[in-house]
Amino acid sequence: MDGEAEDRAWKPVLALRARAERGESAAADDAPAPLDALFGELAATPAGGRFVVAHLGQSLDGRIATESGHSHYIGCEQSLLHLHRLRALVDAVVVGIGTVIADAPRLTTRHCTGPDPVRVVLDPRARLGAEASVVTDRAAPTLVVHSRDVHPMLPDHVETAALAPDPTGALPPAGVLAVLAERGLTRVLVEGGGRTVSSFVAARVLDRLQFAVAPLLIGSGRPALSLPVVETLDAALRPPYGRFELGPDTLFDFDLRATPAA
């Protein structure tokens, strides 16, 4: 599909989101196939409605980066476009401080039409520096969530929120989502890195989990998910899923709402 055809296909999805924002009747299948399956439910979620999706791009052998942290780019252009479309449909995009330090992501919507989400950095130990691009570029609002016992030294235009950490010192995902909901940010994309996404999966607070799998073998490096140990495969997660082709990559879209509570 060429750029103009992609744009024509995307416009009905944005129109669906706009109707949902205004509280008008909107159905997920108002978007054209296959975009209805990929984005329809999220686009049709009204303002204030909850929808939390996590996304990771990985190699075929389950790595999201090399040992040194290099990850640009594991996926193809279609996978990158898909990620930016997700950003355009959510209120907030969440990343861990490790991802910000390693990759300096902009977390804005640049490869498709649509608004920029609020950028949310999970920074329990207040490691984010005032020189970071998410602080200095002012391309989109930025919110830094940190532990209550630290005090970030950031400019006034960067909003901060304190949260009680869990016993390991990490920020609990349910608490993070509550902080966002207080600000009207209820449609959320958890974009990385692997440890951050893993914590949201383990906490069972995700509606959907997506993997864009590239036909690439890294062989070693940083894993996509690290979850609590299970003794048998009976305890493994086997949620319903959809499978979509993104150029040479394959997207697996898991519906975690059907999985039993831990």
Image (tube, rainbow, N blue to C red):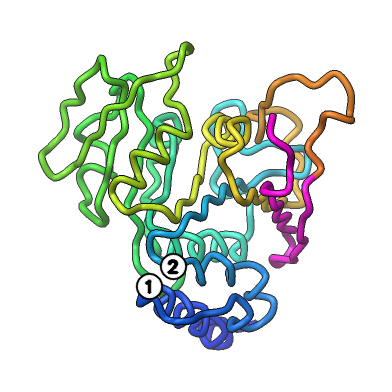
Pinpoint residue 123: horizontal percent, then vertical percent: 35, 28
**Taking 213 as reference, is 57 left or right?**
left
- Secondary structure of residue under mark 1: helix
Q: Nearer the viewer, residue 257 or 140?
A: 257
Q: Which residues are the magenta region?
A: 239-262
Q: Nearer the viewer, residue 215 or 121?
A: 121
**Taking 172 as reference, is 37 left or right?**
right
Pinpoint residue 200: horizontal percent, then vertical percent: 56, 35
Question: Which residue lies at the image location 76% right of the left edge and 32% below the top edge?
Answer: 219
Estimate how packed mark 2 is, as few (under 14), some (14 to 19) or many (20 or more) residues with alpha carbons within 10 Å: many
The quarter of the picture where the C terminus appears is top right
Question: Which residue lies at the image location 60% right of the left edge and 50% below the top edge?
Answer: 207
Pinpoint residue 224: horizontal percent, then vertical percent: 65, 35
Q: Amino acid at mark 1?
A: Glu
Are dots 1 and 2 in contact, CB under 8 Å?
Answer: yes
Compared to residue 70, the image places residue 187 above or below, namely below
Residue 255 painted magenta: yes
Compared to residue 235, the image places residue 73 above or below, namely below
Q: Name the disc covering residue 46, or none.
A: 2
Estimate how packed mark 1 is, as few (under 14), some (14 to 19) or many (20 or more) residues with alpha carbons within 10 Å: some
Compared to residue 17, the image places residue 124 above or below, namely above
Q: Name the disc covering residue 21, or none.
A: 1
Residue 186 painted magenta: no
Compared to residue 163, the image places residue 94 above or below, namely below
- Secondary structure of residue under mark 2: loop
Pinpoint residue 77: horizontal percent, then vertical percent: 59, 64
